[in-house]
Image (cartoon, rainbow, N blue to C red):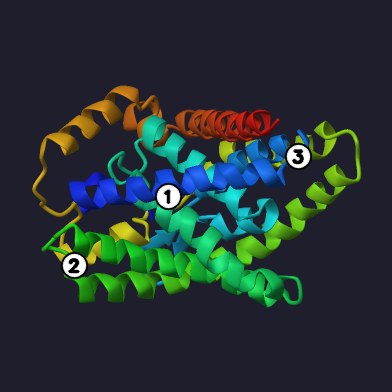
Amino acid sequence: MHMSDALVSVPTALSFWGITAVTSAYASSKIKQEYHEDKSIPFMGVMGAFVFALQMVNFAIPATGSSGHFAGGFLLAMLLGPNAAFLVMASVLFIQALFFADGGLLALGCNIFNMGFIPAYVIYPLFKALTEKNKFFIWLGGALSLLLGSVMVSMQTVLSGISELPFSKMLMLMVGIHILIGIFEGLITIGAYQLINSYKLQTVNNNNTVKPYFGLGIVTVIIASIFSLFASSKPDGLEWSIYRILGRESEPESVKGIFHEMASVVQNKISILPDYNFGGGESFLGTSIAGITGAVLTLIVAASIGYAVNKMSK
Protein backbone atom coordinates (compact mmCIF):
# COMPACT_ATOMS: atom_id res chain seq x y z
CA MET A 1 0.00 0.00 0.00
CA HIS A 2 2.94 2.28 -0.68
CA MET A 3 1.73 5.25 -2.71
CA SER A 4 3.90 6.48 -5.57
CA ASP A 5 4.48 10.15 -6.36
CA ALA A 6 2.16 9.86 -9.38
CA LEU A 7 -0.79 9.55 -6.99
CA VAL A 8 -0.23 12.78 -5.06
CA SER A 9 -0.20 16.47 -5.89
CA VAL A 10 2.37 18.79 -4.34
CA PRO A 11 -0.13 20.48 -1.96
CA THR A 12 -1.37 17.09 -0.71
CA ALA A 13 2.17 15.79 -0.38
CA LEU A 14 3.37 18.84 1.56
CA SER A 15 0.32 18.74 3.81
CA PHE A 16 0.99 15.18 4.91
CA TRP A 17 4.72 15.85 5.18
CA GLY A 18 3.75 18.62 7.60
CA ILE A 19 1.53 16.27 9.60
CA THR A 20 4.37 13.77 9.72
CA ALA A 21 6.84 16.37 10.95
CA VAL A 22 4.54 17.63 13.71
CA THR A 23 3.66 14.09 14.81
CA SER A 24 7.34 13.10 14.84
CA ALA A 25 8.13 16.03 17.14
CA TYR A 26 5.22 15.10 19.39
CA ALA A 27 6.22 11.42 19.48
CA SER A 28 9.83 12.31 20.31
CA SER A 29 8.77 14.54 23.18
CA LYS A 30 6.59 11.77 24.60
CA ILE A 31 9.32 9.15 24.30
CA LYS A 32 11.54 11.32 26.48
CA GLN A 33 9.02 10.72 29.25
CA GLU A 34 8.31 7.05 28.47
CA TYR A 35 11.73 5.55 27.71
CA HIS A 36 13.99 6.06 30.69
CA GLU A 37 16.31 3.08 30.16
CA ASP A 38 18.71 2.25 27.35
CA LYS A 39 17.35 -1.33 27.15
CA SER A 40 14.28 -0.02 25.27
CA ILE A 41 16.39 1.34 22.41
CA PRO A 42 17.55 -1.97 20.88
CA PHE A 43 13.96 -3.18 20.82
CA MET A 44 12.96 -0.24 18.61
CA GLY A 45 15.72 -1.11 16.17
CA VAL A 46 15.00 -4.84 16.08
CA MET A 47 11.28 -4.26 15.63
CA GLY A 48 11.93 -1.89 12.74
CA ALA A 49 14.09 -4.51 11.04
CA PHE A 50 11.48 -7.22 11.69
CA VAL A 51 8.63 -5.20 10.14
CA PHE A 52 10.82 -4.24 7.17
CA ALA A 53 11.55 -7.92 6.52
CA LEU A 54 7.90 -8.97 6.79
CA GLN A 55 6.79 -6.21 4.42
CA MET A 56 8.97 -7.77 1.71
CA VAL A 57 6.94 -10.99 1.73
CA ASN A 58 3.94 -10.38 -0.51
CA PHE A 59 1.33 -13.15 -0.34
CA ALA A 60 -1.19 -13.92 -3.09
CA ILE A 61 -4.88 -13.23 -2.42
CA PRO A 62 -6.78 -16.24 -3.81
CA ALA A 63 -9.07 -15.74 -6.81
CA THR A 64 -8.26 -12.04 -7.19
CA GLY A 65 -5.01 -11.80 -9.14
CA SER A 66 -3.73 -9.52 -6.39
CA SER A 67 -1.31 -9.77 -3.50
CA GLY A 68 -0.88 -8.15 -0.13
CA HIS A 69 1.84 -7.65 2.41
CA PHE A 70 1.99 -7.22 6.16
CA ALA A 71 1.97 -3.57 7.26
CA GLY A 72 2.73 -3.95 10.96
CA GLY A 73 1.69 -0.60 12.39
CA PHE A 74 -0.71 -2.06 14.95
CA LEU A 75 1.84 -4.70 15.98
CA LEU A 76 4.42 -1.97 16.62
CA ALA A 77 1.92 0.05 18.67
CA MET A 78 1.11 -2.93 20.90
CA LEU A 79 4.76 -3.77 21.55
CA LEU A 80 6.36 -0.31 21.65
CA GLY A 81 3.55 2.06 22.47
CA PRO A 82 2.07 4.50 19.93
CA ASN A 83 4.84 7.11 19.97
CA ALA A 84 7.78 4.78 19.42
CA ALA A 85 5.68 2.77 16.96
CA PHE A 86 5.08 5.85 14.82
CA LEU A 87 8.78 6.72 14.70
CA VAL A 88 9.79 3.14 13.91
CA MET A 89 7.25 2.87 11.09
CA ALA A 90 8.47 6.21 9.74
CA SER A 91 11.99 4.76 9.75
CA VAL A 92 10.86 1.66 7.83
CA LEU A 93 9.06 3.69 5.16
CA PHE A 94 11.92 6.19 4.90
CA ILE A 95 14.45 3.42 4.20
CA GLN A 96 12.11 1.76 1.70
CA ALA A 97 11.51 4.97 -0.26
CA LEU A 98 15.06 6.31 -0.20
CA PHE A 99 17.14 3.19 -0.85
CA PHE A 100 14.72 0.77 -2.54
CA ALA A 101 12.37 3.12 -4.49
CA ASP A 102 9.37 1.55 -2.74
CA GLY A 103 6.88 4.39 -2.43
CA GLY A 104 7.54 7.93 -3.61
CA LEU A 105 9.53 10.57 -1.78
CA LEU A 106 6.78 13.16 -2.24
CA ALA A 107 4.23 10.58 -1.13
CA LEU A 108 6.28 9.57 1.92
CA GLY A 109 4.27 11.79 4.26
CA CYS A 110 1.05 10.16 3.02
CA ASN A 111 2.48 6.67 3.45
CA ILE A 112 3.69 7.41 6.98
CA PHE A 113 0.28 8.77 7.88
CA ASN A 114 -1.56 5.78 6.40
CA MET A 115 0.64 3.04 7.86
CA GLY A 116 2.06 4.79 10.93
CA PHE A 117 -0.28 7.46 12.26
CA ILE A 118 -3.56 5.59 11.78
CA PRO A 119 -2.62 2.38 13.63
CA ALA A 120 -0.66 4.18 16.36
CA TYR A 121 -2.92 7.12 17.15
CA VAL A 122 -6.36 6.11 15.84
CA ILE A 123 -6.84 2.34 16.08
CA TYR A 124 -4.52 1.43 18.97
CA PRO A 125 -6.10 3.80 21.54
CA LEU A 126 -9.52 2.31 20.71
CA PHE A 127 -8.39 -1.30 21.08
CA LYS A 128 -5.65 -1.11 23.72
CA ALA A 129 -7.76 -2.34 26.63
CA LEU A 130 -9.64 -4.87 24.50
CA THR A 131 -6.50 -6.58 23.18
CA GLU A 132 -5.54 -7.51 26.73
CA LYS A 133 -8.80 -9.44 27.13
CA ASN A 134 -9.25 -11.26 23.82
CA LYS A 135 -6.97 -12.13 20.90
CA PHE A 136 -9.82 -11.40 18.50
CA PHE A 137 -9.31 -7.69 19.11
CA ILE A 138 -5.63 -8.02 18.18
CA TRP A 139 -6.78 -9.44 14.85
CA LEU A 140 -9.45 -6.77 14.46
CA GLY A 141 -7.06 -3.95 15.29
CA GLY A 142 -4.55 -5.11 12.68
CA ALA A 143 -7.24 -5.57 10.04
CA LEU A 144 -8.93 -2.21 10.70
CA SER A 145 -5.60 -0.38 10.64
CA LEU A 146 -5.00 -1.66 7.12
CA LEU A 147 -8.58 -1.02 6.01
CA LEU A 148 -8.65 2.58 7.24
CA GLY A 149 -5.28 3.16 5.59
CA SER A 150 -6.77 2.02 2.26
CA VAL A 151 -9.61 4.50 2.71
CA MET A 152 -7.08 7.29 3.28
CA VAL A 153 -5.25 6.36 0.06
CA SER A 154 -8.50 6.85 -1.86
CA MET A 155 -9.08 10.21 -0.17
CA GLN A 156 -5.52 11.38 -0.86
CA THR A 157 -5.83 10.62 -4.58
CA VAL A 158 -9.06 12.61 -4.69
CA LEU A 159 -7.46 15.52 -2.81
CA SER A 160 -4.66 15.38 -5.37
CA GLY A 161 -7.11 15.74 -8.26
CA ILE A 162 -6.21 12.46 -9.98
CA SER A 163 -9.23 12.46 -12.30
CA GLU A 164 -8.44 9.04 -13.77
CA LEU A 165 -9.11 7.50 -10.34
CA PRO A 166 -12.72 8.41 -9.42
CA PHE A 167 -13.27 8.33 -5.67
CA SER A 168 -16.22 5.92 -5.68
CA LYS A 169 -14.50 3.31 -7.85
CA MET A 170 -11.19 3.73 -6.07
CA LEU A 171 -12.79 3.41 -2.65
CA MET A 172 -14.86 0.36 -3.60
CA LEU A 173 -11.90 -1.54 -5.03
CA MET A 174 -9.44 -0.50 -2.31
CA VAL A 175 -11.79 -1.41 0.53
CA GLY A 176 -12.83 -4.65 -1.14
CA ILE A 177 -9.34 -6.00 -1.71
CA HIS A 178 -8.01 -4.73 1.63
CA ILE A 179 -10.76 -6.49 3.53
CA LEU A 180 -9.22 -9.71 2.20
CA ILE A 181 -5.66 -8.56 2.87
CA GLY A 182 -6.76 -7.40 6.33
CA ILE A 183 -7.71 -10.97 7.24
CA PHE A 184 -4.09 -12.00 6.80
CA GLU A 185 -2.84 -8.80 8.45
CA GLY A 186 -4.78 -9.66 11.59
CA LEU A 187 -3.62 -13.27 11.68
CA ILE A 188 0.05 -12.33 11.21
CA THR A 189 -0.33 -9.66 13.89
CA ILE A 190 -1.57 -12.23 16.41
CA GLY A 191 1.22 -14.70 15.65
CA ALA A 192 3.98 -12.10 15.61
CA TYR A 193 2.72 -10.49 18.82
CA GLN A 194 2.77 -13.78 20.71
CA LEU A 195 6.27 -14.56 19.44
CA ILE A 196 7.82 -11.15 20.01
CA ASN A 197 6.09 -10.35 23.27
CA SER A 198 7.79 -13.39 24.81
CA TYR A 199 11.16 -11.91 23.81
CA LYS A 200 10.13 -8.54 25.22
CA LEU A 201 9.19 -10.09 28.55
CA GLN A 202 12.55 -11.89 28.68
CA THR A 203 14.28 -8.56 28.15
CA VAL A 204 12.35 -6.86 30.92
CA ASN A 205 13.21 -9.66 33.36
CA ASN A 206 16.75 -10.20 32.16
CA ASN A 207 19.69 -7.86 32.63
CA ASN A 208 21.28 -9.33 29.47
CA THR A 209 19.38 -7.47 26.74
CA VAL A 210 21.45 -8.96 23.89
CA LYS A 211 20.36 -12.60 24.08
CA PRO A 212 16.58 -12.17 23.62
CA TYR A 213 17.02 -9.72 20.75
CA PHE A 214 19.59 -11.96 19.08
CA GLY A 215 16.96 -14.65 18.57
CA LEU A 216 14.51 -12.17 17.06
CA GLY A 217 17.31 -10.84 14.87
CA ILE A 218 17.96 -14.32 13.50
CA VAL A 219 14.28 -14.71 12.65
CA THR A 220 14.41 -11.32 10.89
CA VAL A 221 17.42 -12.33 8.78
CA ILE A 222 15.74 -15.59 7.77
CA ILE A 223 12.59 -13.76 6.68
CA ALA A 224 14.53 -11.06 4.81
CA SER A 225 16.94 -13.40 3.02
CA ILE A 226 14.89 -16.57 2.46
CA PHE A 227 11.15 -16.03 2.86
CA SER A 228 11.35 -12.93 0.67
CA LEU A 229 12.41 -15.15 -2.25
CA PHE A 230 8.93 -16.67 -2.27
CA ALA A 231 7.05 -13.38 -2.34
CA SER A 232 4.19 -13.15 -4.83
CA SER A 233 4.89 -11.18 -8.00
CA LYS A 234 1.23 -10.25 -8.43
CA PRO A 235 0.34 -6.55 -8.06
CA ASP A 236 -0.44 -5.46 -4.51
CA GLY A 237 -3.86 -4.21 -3.47
CA LEU A 238 -3.19 -0.59 -4.43
CA GLU A 239 -1.67 -1.43 -7.83
CA TRP A 240 -4.43 -3.96 -8.52
CA SER A 241 -7.12 -1.35 -7.81
CA ILE A 242 -5.47 1.20 -10.10
CA TYR A 243 -5.04 -1.32 -12.92
CA ARG A 244 -8.69 -2.34 -12.67
CA ILE A 245 -9.84 1.27 -12.97
CA LEU A 246 -7.46 2.26 -15.78
CA GLY A 247 -7.74 -0.99 -17.70
CA ARG A 248 -3.96 -1.10 -18.06
CA GLU A 249 -0.92 -1.88 -15.95
CA SER A 250 0.46 1.62 -15.49
CA GLU A 251 0.21 4.62 -13.24
CA PRO A 252 -2.38 7.33 -13.91
CA GLU A 253 -1.46 10.21 -16.15
CA SER A 254 -1.08 13.18 -13.84
CA VAL A 255 0.40 16.62 -14.15
CA LYS A 256 3.98 16.42 -12.91
CA GLY A 257 5.88 19.57 -12.11
CA ILE A 258 9.37 20.39 -10.97
CA PHE A 259 8.89 18.88 -7.51
CA HIS A 260 7.89 15.52 -8.97
CA GLU A 261 10.90 15.61 -11.27
CA MET A 262 13.28 16.55 -8.46
CA ALA A 263 11.94 13.77 -6.23
CA SER A 264 12.34 11.27 -9.07
CA VAL A 265 15.94 12.34 -9.74
CA VAL A 266 16.88 12.10 -6.06
CA GLN A 267 15.24 8.71 -5.68
CA ASN A 268 16.94 7.32 -8.80
CA LYS A 269 20.32 8.57 -7.61
CA ILE A 270 20.08 7.24 -4.07
CA SER A 271 18.21 3.96 -4.57
CA ILE A 272 20.94 1.37 -4.17
CA LEU A 273 18.69 -1.64 -4.81
CA PRO A 274 15.56 -0.45 -6.65
CA ASP A 275 12.64 -2.86 -6.36
CA TYR A 276 14.72 -4.83 -3.86
CA ASN A 277 17.19 -6.18 -6.40
CA PHE A 278 20.25 -5.37 -8.50
CA GLY A 279 19.23 -2.65 -10.94
CA GLY A 280 15.59 -3.64 -10.68
CA GLY A 281 16.39 -7.19 -11.82
CA GLU A 282 14.96 -10.44 -10.48
CA SER A 283 17.89 -12.43 -9.10
CA PHE A 284 17.48 -14.43 -5.88
CA LEU A 285 20.81 -13.12 -4.59
CA GLY A 286 19.74 -9.52 -5.17
CA THR A 287 16.50 -10.04 -3.24
CA SER A 288 18.29 -11.63 -0.29
CA ILE A 289 20.93 -8.91 -0.15
CA ALA A 290 18.25 -6.22 -0.40
CA GLY A 291 16.32 -7.80 2.45
CA ILE A 292 19.30 -8.03 4.77
CA THR A 293 20.58 -4.56 3.80
CA GLY A 294 17.20 -2.96 4.38
CA ALA A 295 16.70 -4.70 7.71
CA VAL A 296 20.12 -3.56 8.94
CA LEU A 297 19.59 0.02 7.75
CA THR A 298 16.19 0.16 9.41
CA LEU A 299 17.60 -1.23 12.65
CA ILE A 300 20.30 1.45 12.66
CA VAL A 301 17.91 4.32 11.90
CA ALA A 302 15.19 3.25 14.36
CA ALA A 303 17.67 2.54 17.15
CA SER A 304 19.48 5.82 16.47
CA ILE A 305 16.23 7.75 16.85
CA GLY A 306 15.61 6.05 20.19
CA TYR A 307 19.18 6.68 21.31
CA ALA A 308 19.10 10.35 20.31
CA VAL A 309 15.79 11.00 22.04
CA ASN A 310 16.97 9.14 25.14
CA LYS A 311 20.15 11.21 25.33
CA MET A 312 18.23 14.44 24.91
CA SER A 313 15.96 13.46 27.77
CA LYS A 314 19.01 13.11 30.02
Question: x, y (%) of residue 285?
Answer: 49, 29
Q: CA distance from mark 3 to mark 1?
A: 26 Å
On screen, residue 294 versus residue 238, left or right, reads right
Residue 56 in view (yes/no) = no
On screen, residue 175 versus residue 301, left or right, reads left
Mark on residue 112?
A: 1
Marks 3 and 1, the one that precedes in the sequence = 3
Crowding at dot 3, Cα within 10 Å, few <14 / some 14-19 / many 20+, comes out as some
Crowding at dot 2, Cα within 10 Å, few <14 / some 14-19 / many 20+, comes out as some
Give the secondary structure at mark 2.
Answer: helix
Q: Nearer the viewer, residue 282 or 77?
A: 77
Residue 19 in view (yes/no) = yes
Q: What residue is rendered at 32% in x and 60% in y? A: 238
Location of residue 157 with respect to 291 vertically, above or below: below
Location of residue 61 with respect to 92 vertically, above or below: below
Q: Which residue is mark 3?
A: 36
Mark 2 belongs to which amino acid?
A: Ile
Mark 3 belongs to which amino acid?
A: His
Q: CA distance from mark 2 to mark 3?
A: 50 Å
Question: x, y (%) of residue 192?
Answer: 68, 56
Question: x, y (%) of residue 222?
Answer: 65, 39
Give the secondary structure at mark 3.
Answer: loop
Q: CA distance from mark 2 to mark 1?
A: 25 Å
